[in-house]
Image (spheres, grey):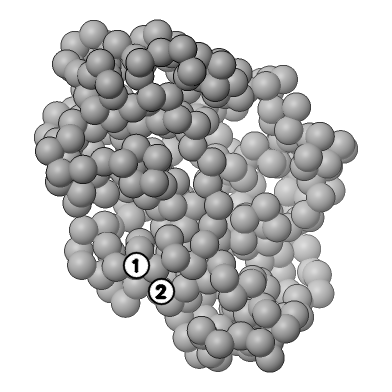
Amino acid sequence: MKAIVQDRYGPPETLTLADVDAPVPAADEVLVRVEAAALNAYDWHVMRGDPRLARLSMGRSGPQARIRGRDFAGRVEAVGPDVRQVRPGDAVFGDLGDANGAFAEYVCVPETLVARKPGNLTPQQAAALPLAGVTALMGLCDVGQVEPGHHVLVNGASGGVGTLAVQLAKALGATVTGVCSTRNVDLVRSLGADHVVDYTRADFTHDTGRHDVVFDLVGNRSLTALRRALTPTGTLVLSGGGVYRGGSLVGPVWLIARGRLLAPFVRHRIAILTTAPSRQHLDTLRAHAEAGRLTPVIDRTYRLPEVPEAIRYVEGEHARAKVVITI
C-alpha cells in the first residue's frame, strides 16, 4: 500500500511517499480502507520532534512509528475474531493515538478507538473530528464542566479545536466569546460565537469581562493574563498550542508546568487537559454532528502525495479550522 513514512526528525522534506506492507488486524482490531485523514498540530510536533524534550518518549533520532497521521475516516475491510461493534462495509472514523499510521491507504485500529461515522458527514468532515473534537469535548465537559448559562472564552477559536469548541460550547448552552485574528472574525461569528475578539485590535484579558471558563488553545499568554479573564472562581483549561518557530526545548509544556505549580495556591481552578481517544467520546461527537450541533470546518484538502505541503501549511500558522487529506 502507499503511505507517508518518516525515518528521522526534520522538516516536511523528511516525509516520503512509499510502498509498505498493508497491516493485518489482530484479534481485537479493525482493518480500515482509509478515505480521508486529517492533520493536527500533533503531526508536525512528531515530525520535527518538537519540543525536543518530548523525544525522550517519541524516539531519540526519529519517531518510533514510521507512518504519520492519527485521524481517519473510511470503510471497514476486515475485522479480527474478537471484534463485535463493527463489521466489513461499515463507514467508520477514529483516532489512532500515538500509534499513528493514518496517512496511508489502510490502517489497523483497536475496536475501542473506532466508531460509526456520522451519517450526515462526508469522509473528509468525519476525519476532521476525532482528535480536535475529543479535545474540545473533554476541555469543555470533562474538565471545564460547562453548564447552561456559563460564559466561556475560547482563545484560538478559528483553529481545528477552536472551531469545534465554539460550536460545542453553544450546544451546552453557554455564552461564547471567541478570540481570533481579523481574517477569521466572520468565520468564528458564523459558528455561533456571541462575541468575537480580534486579538490584533483588543486584549481579551482586559476587554472582555469575566468568564466562568477560559479554554486556552494557543499558549501565547501568561497565566496572570489568562486569569484576569476569569470570574473569581472560574476555571482555566490549558491545552498546549503554538506554531513552529525554529524548535524549542520544552514548548508549551513550560506554561502547563507553571499551571500545575500554581494551581494549589490560587482561588481559580487551573486544569491541564490531557486527551485520550475512545469510542465513547467518538459516539458523543457523532450524536452532536447528526443532531446538527457540530459541523467540522475544512480549510483545504490535499492528496496523499501532498502531505508534506499540507503539513508545511499547517505548521506555519496559515491554516484555519481543519486541513484534510483525501486518499
> Could you tell whether 108 is left or right of 134 in the image?
right
- Disc 1 is placed on an element classified as helix
Q: Badges 1 and 2: C-beta atoms under 8 Å apart?
A: yes
How packed mark 1 is, by other alpha carbons closer than 10 Å (few <14, some 14-19, many 20 or more), is: many
Q: Amino acid at mark 1?
A: Arg
Camera-side mark, 1 or 2: 1
Q: Quadrant of the N terminus?
A: bottom right
The residue identified by callout 1 is 286
Q: Which residue reaches farthest right?
A: 61
The residue identified by callout 2 is 117
List x then y, in percent, for residue 124.
42, 64
Q: Quadrant of the C terminus?
A: bottom right
The label shown at residue 75 is none
Which residue lies at the image location 34% right of the left edge and 37% below the top edge? Answer: 144
List x then y, in percent, for residue 193.
17, 38
Q: Amino acid at mark 2?
A: Lys
Q: Which sits in the foreground, 103 or 254?
A: 254
- Disc 2 is placed on an element classified as loop
> Could you tell whether 159 is left or right of 275 in the image?
left
| Distance between the alpha carbons at the discs numbered 1 and 2 | 7 Å
List x then y, in percent, for residue 52.
75, 27
Which residue lies at the image location 62% right of the left edge and 55% below the top edge? Answer: 97
